[in-house]
Image (spheres, rainbow, N blue to C red):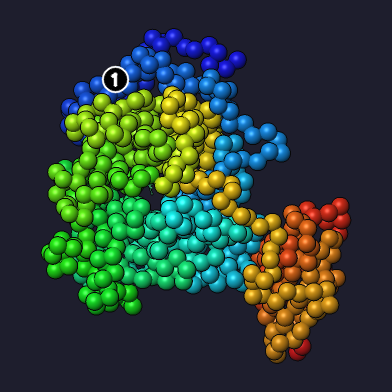
Amino acid sequence: MSKHETPRDPNEVLEEYEETLDSVLAEVESPDEATTDDDISLGLPGLSLGRRDFMKAGVAAGAMGSVAGCSALSGGDSSAGSQSTPSSSGASHTVEPGEHDEYYGFWSGGHSGELRVIGIPSMRELTRIPVFNTDCASGYGFTDGTQEMLEEGGGYSWGDNHHPNLSETDGDYDGEYLYVNDKANGRIARVNLTYFETDAITDVPNMQAIHGCCVLSPDTKYVLGNGEFRAPLPNDGTDAKNPDNYTSLFVAVDPDSMETQWQVKVDGNLDIVDTGKEGRWAISSAYNSEEATDIQGMTKDDRDNVKAFDIPAIEQAVENGNYEEVNGIPVVDGTQGSSLNQGDRPVVKYIPTPKSPHCVEVGPNGDYAFIAGKLSPTVTMLDLNALADSSDPDEVVAGRPRVGLGPLHTTFDGNGHAYTSLFIDSQTVKWDIQAAVEAEEGSEDSIIEKQDVHYNPGHIQALEAMTTDPDGEWLVSLNKLSKDRFLPVGPIMPDNDQLIHIGQGEKEMELVADHPAYPEPHDCVFAHKDKIDAKKVYDKDDYEETYITEEDSGVERTGENSVHVKMTTKRSEFGLPDFTVQEGDEVKLSTTNIEGVQDIIHGVAIPEHDINYAVAPQDTREVTFTADDPGVYWIYCTYFCSALHLEMRSRMIVEPAEG
Ligand code: K7E
Ligand code: CUA
């Protein structure tokens, strides 16, 4: 029986809530976490709150639940487990066997380095796309083209992807590409959405961590990246011990050539970035305006400077030659003291905002940028239309509702509502955008309801919320901790992605599903299925590789110590039953899958040579390796392709070198 059919007694829930609160308080009272007797740290570095504040916040949330009889009590109950619950509003996220989901969801995979494609609303994982990692199932990072791409993209074996972004035309997704950052090594990658494969990786010069990443709306003129870590420029050992001379950079990468176009250096750290809808403003959140190197220093001040990058003004500066070239890249000076920031068209505007603010999301019509306070319980709304004439906070701040503790990210339903994740409160708060503009700063008047999530959410994302026309209906809360929600699987627990029904904003939020996620998604983005045209069979015209026919199969000696082996794959044989090379030969092996039928994949595995890769219908893949040791090596197919799959084999015979 579902919890919805037997709603719980609100008093019982309140009591339970108080108990949880007590145990949280007991936890944070341990001496190394408490800053003073009266202040408690809540697990978020640098944050301390008066205990009474915290009690108030907790009780208020509980009380709100009981008054509204809202889903925080019925649907958000922690015993829902890893199953989905039938929805009391009739919203179903079930997708029947054989049916397709309505939306593609693209999840960043954090330090796993991959992307995951998840169907919405079923939350079924459809595939994974290796980006900064290697993947032995597909052969990504092992085949010639992909290995080179990773090598030229810095040669790292891992990356930390946070922010997936879909390419746009006229402010809407065009289904062509997805761009994602590597926070670890300062890279930006591109994924081709025709074949769902990574096709470019750019190792951006002069930058260590690229954290925030977005495309410039409305037509993807640039892929923009935020340098989070301050470092000397150039970082060549000079001035290494003098943090006063460190700097943070903002970068623009060309979406077609994937080449770095220009950078802007700024004061303080950059964090997350999003753009307005008119191609002029890129807004970056920021922390560490203090320019410190330790946590106490970074969180000292009450305000940090959000930066508004004026893209056409920056382009003008580059065109006028107002830059310094560092490692081949034009770097424009956007620091506060820069001459480029003194006139009436500064390249960067600095807007003081409380406190170590984390996210920036620009709302659907491009009027406001929403900047969540992280260490302040507020969201600051910047009026993008007022920005051209002023950067005075009194003139450009359109609203500042008090939403709850630890606000991190905001998303939209397209019907005037904003939804903000509350890391510390473990809630999603829904609020009215216009009401927040009309209310006093710090007022809670705009808040409509709060939904408990489990636990500690980072990003939240509603359907197509980053376009000019969001679709509403579903929202996903990407919760960092799952604690007790799933069967224990050892100490490294999954995250918990929760699906929340929001309708068109007219309904109460309703939690409908829990989905464990392998570490560690940060963000996701959704596109309606009609906007993406994924091919099921390769089109050989899209690739330069030589297509190999059955007649081409054979061994060609290309040098004294090198051979080119060509062979086809089809059910259930390789084009060569065996082939012979000499010890020490460099072997280039090209394989074409000549099948024209969808979903018939063949794998090419060569034992003891560290080789396995997939060849999809009409695709050609190549590997190059050295045949070091004489002997017989069975080559076998790793995709179960037919009833005679086990028999699908070839032999590589390596003859001993003479003498
Ligand atoms: Cu995790 Cu967008 Cu990198 Cu916020 S970021 S949570
Ligand atoms: Cu081809 Cu199995």
Q: Is residue 69 left or right of residue 518?
A: left
Under mark 1, the amino acid is Ala
Return the x and y of residue 496 as percentages of the image width and height.
49, 36
User: In the image shown, does 511 or 177 lie closer to the viewer?
Assistant: 177
Residue at (58, 67) in percent of width and height: 146
Does the rendering let one see residue 528?
Answer: yes
Residue 648 image-quadrant placement: bottom right
Q: Which image quarter is the C terminus in?
A: bottom right
Residue 129 image-quadrant placement: bottom right
Would you place residue 560 above or below residue 621 in this image? below
Return the x and y of residue 498 as percentages of the image width and height.
49, 33
Would you place residue 321 above or below residue 307 in this image? below
Query: Mark 1: which secondary structure?
Result: helix
Q: Is residue 638 left or right of residue 514?
A: right
Residue 550 image-quadrant placement: bottom right
Q: Which image quarter is the N terminus in?
A: top right
Q: Is residue 659 left or right of residue 399?
A: right
**What residue sits right under mark 1 in the picture?**
60
Return the x and y of residue 89 as percentages of the image width and height.
52, 21
Residue at (44, 55) in percent of width and height: 170
Return the x and y of residue 210 as percentages of the image width and height.
36, 59
Does the rendering let one see residue 155?
Answer: no
Residue at (75, 56) in percent of width and height: 598
Residue at (50, 45) in percent of width and height: 526
Q: Residues within 10 Å of mark 1 (few under 14, many from 20)?
A: few
User: In the image shown, does 404 or 417 lie closer to the viewer?
Assistant: 417
